[in-house]
Amino acid sequence: MISLEKKLLTWLDQGLINQEQLTAIGKYEQRTSGNNNNHWWLYSLLILGSSIISLGIISLIAANWANIPDLVKLGTAFGLLSVLAVTTLWQSKPDSGYMYDALLTAFIILCLAVIGLIAQVFHLSGHWYNALLLWSAITLPTVLFARQLFACFLWSTIFIHAATWGAIALSSGSFSGNNAAQLPALFLLAPLLAAGGYVLTRLSQHLKLFRSSFFFWFQISGLVALIFIDIIRSGGEMRSFELNWYIPAYIVAAILMTMIASNPAYRPLNKGLLISIILLLLLYFHPFILFDGETRYSFNALQDPGGTVNFWTADDIRAPFLTILILFLYATHAGNIGHHRTFNVMTFLIGLRFVILYFQAMGGLAATGVGLILSGLMIIGIAWFWHKSRKRLQHWSEGLHE
Amino acid sequence: MNRQFGLALALLLPIVVLAGNTWMHYQQRIAGESITFPIEGFDPRDLLSGHYLIYRIDYGIDDNGNCPTSDIAASLCLEPERRIYPVDELPQSCTQFIRGNCDSSTRFISGLERFYVPQQYADILDKKVRNKQGKLVVSVDQSGNAGVVDLLIDDRPWKKIVTEE
């Protein structure tokens, strides 16, 4: 606000605005910032406070008070839950501001604590993701009444994690997280599920507050999945593949592609780009279609002296090119719909992957003086090319229409 | 629908579901028949996992009555003969049984293999279970649902043992 006042005075001195305009802008900013921004710290502290109180309650309950009868523990927990529900309802007036969302968030966290308490009192066996899925199902109607982002973000985060692990466990029968061979299925499903959630939220105004949360998790999990599978395929590792581990991902991918294809908000170009990305990702995670797990260009001379490996058929060359292709398609889509920040990040990642690919393919050369000079020149060249070309590429992608 | 009324229903839903769940487990605990099984630890796996003990339950089944195959839903018949059957092959003559499944190593898992304990008593109880002093009191209802009631050490409730030590 202070910086704005300074700027306004500067503009007034420079004759860019007059005194009336300055007063009008000042009044407008005071009114709008009073509604939206001034209380962000209060909101954060209220959320933090309610989260800490909820965690304290969880800790107290989890402390296993051996001498307190089970019925007293459960009675206290349900009493707290009821009091919180009534207080939330009481604070639900439109002018109640952030207190309402803080109470609502505390209520849903306490629901999770009560699930834990029930499991503890009755010594229930079960997986954490089943408990979280139950929590997601029973708290969703409450979260739909949230007015701020935090409760929706918390719910989406927990739901995506629980649904991903739960779906893989359901399809594989015995997923424990200790079986590393099943991890690719988990990494593939997470971004697809988050993307599915995002597309669903675009269909209904009631789900509007969930949109940014699902989009955030889609981008994060998508990037992690791409890095993970690039490392795995480049190294020829994790060759175990059982179809049932991947069934949830294939089902979600099919639903997602149908939703994208039938969404009138997307142009045909964007539909094509997004569906291509999904198909490429599915291909990438399949260990046999594009990869053989044995042919590697790097260190080939050490592994097979005298043998020759075709540059284009080696797994550790195909993998980065597939990564770059997926990033390029997504960058084009982001540029086309005006997501400039995503576009910049994607094109930067493409450049970064090219540099890593260079060291993968020419690793031996980098050990020499000439090689180091060439490597440095290449990094500078890619950075320069990215800086010079991204605007042009962005305009090109924006201009891609039907 | 009035927004306030909708919110009230939404807030009521988790309370009702969780209270119903609690009531169901509580009823099962008090209405079922109590049966006591010996339990034992299994090295080298650590019996303690966070705040709970994990163990194997000795159902008293001989080799012939064990899991017929791996990864199936199964029922452990307790009366008249202790034997594990695939869930759809449980004989009519079986008057008391526990639902569960046979895991990948053809071991019967009933979901009773976990007992929550306060952290300060965990080490003491862990040692006693390893010494085969532990027994599990289980409540089994007519539908084959089973729930843990108590942990016995030397045939006495664990709370008495830990307060004495």
Image (cartoon, coloured by chain):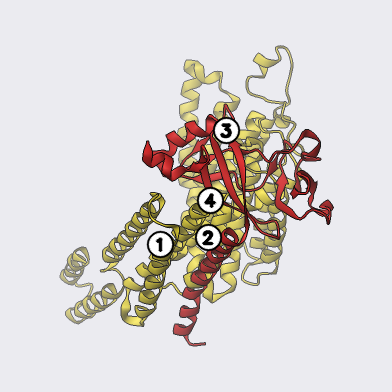
Chain colours: A yellow, B red
Camera sees residue A329: no
Does label 2 lie on the same chain as label 1? yes
Where's residue B91, x and y in %? 84, 53
The image quadrant of residue A332 is bottom right
Where's residue B61, x and y in %? 73, 38
The residue positioned farthest toward the bottom in the image shown: B2
> Residue B41 — which label?
3
Q: Secondary structure at mark 4?
A: loop
Give neighbour class at mark 4: few <14, some 14-19, many 20+ (Cα, 10 Å): many
Left or right for A124, reference A54: right
Q: Amino acid at mark 1?
A: Val
In three-dimensional space, the C-alpha distance between marks 1 and 2, rounded to whole angstroms, equals 39 Å
Q: Secondary structure at mark 1?
A: helix
Give neighbour class at mark 2: few <14, some 14-19, many 20+ (Cα, 10 Å): many
In three-dimensional space, the C-alpha distance between marks 3 and 2, rounded to whole angstroms, equals 43 Å
Q: Nearer the viewer, mark 2 or mark 4?
A: 4
The residue positioned farthest toward the top in the image shown: A305
Q: Quadrant of the N terminus of chain A?
A: bottom left
Q: Amino acid at mark 3?
A: Gly
Q: Amino acid at mark 2?
A: Phe
In three-dimensional space, the C-alpha distance between marks 2 and 4, rounded to whole angstroms, equals 34 Å
The number of numbered badges drawn on the structure is: 4
- Judging by the rendered image, the residue that carries numbered circle 2 is A214
Where's residue A167, x and y in %? 65, 53
Q: Are marks 3 and 2 in contact (CB under 8 Å)?
A: no
- Judging by the rendered image, the residue that carries numbered circle 4 is A123
In three-dimensional space, the C-alpha distance between marks 3 and 1, rounded to whole angstroms, equals 31 Å
| Residue found at x 46% / y 41% | B50
> Residue A72 — which label?
1
Say if A133 sits above or below A144 in the image: above
Disc nearer the start of the sequence (4/1): 1
